[in-house]
Amino acid sequence: MNSGVRNVLVAGLFVLLAGYRANADSVFPGAEWHHIPASEAGWSEAALTVAHERANALHSTALMVVAHGVVVVDWGDTVKRTELASVRKSL
């Protein structure tokens, strides 16, 4: 796996876990993902901007942050399939 892809995945996982808080308001997405503003979900706009800049520097194809079943932010083409191999070993 490309080290850039691995770095983006690890950074995305870190951002996701750092901002995760269990919540009774969590929802399971249906056919469509619901989007909410990052600040409304309790996420730092500044930290997400840094993550976005890092993802761009690594030439990532897409990144999506989901908290409690809703999309906080997504960049790139999150619908397009991306061929990845051995991702689980990296994490």
Image (cartoon, helix red, strand yellow):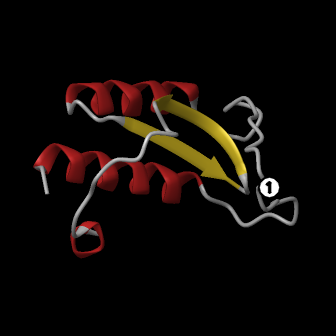
Determine whether 13 is above or below 88 in the image.
above
Q: Secondary structure at mark 1?
A: loop
61 or 38: nearer the eye?
Answer: 61
Q: Residues within 10 Å of mark 1 (few under 14, many from 20)?
A: few
What residue sits 61% from the left and 58% below the top?
Answer: 20
60 or 16: nearer the eye?
Answer: 60
- Say which residue label 1 marks: 30
| Residue 43 visible in the current orientation | no
Left or right side of 34 for 11: left
Left or right side of 32 for 72: left
Q: Quadrant of the C terminus?
A: bottom left
Residue 84 in percent (x, y) is at: 26, 57
19 or 69: nearer the eye?
Answer: 69
9 or 17: nearer the eye?
Answer: 9
What residue sits 39% from the left and 34% below the top?
Answer: 51
Figure quadrant of residue 59: top left
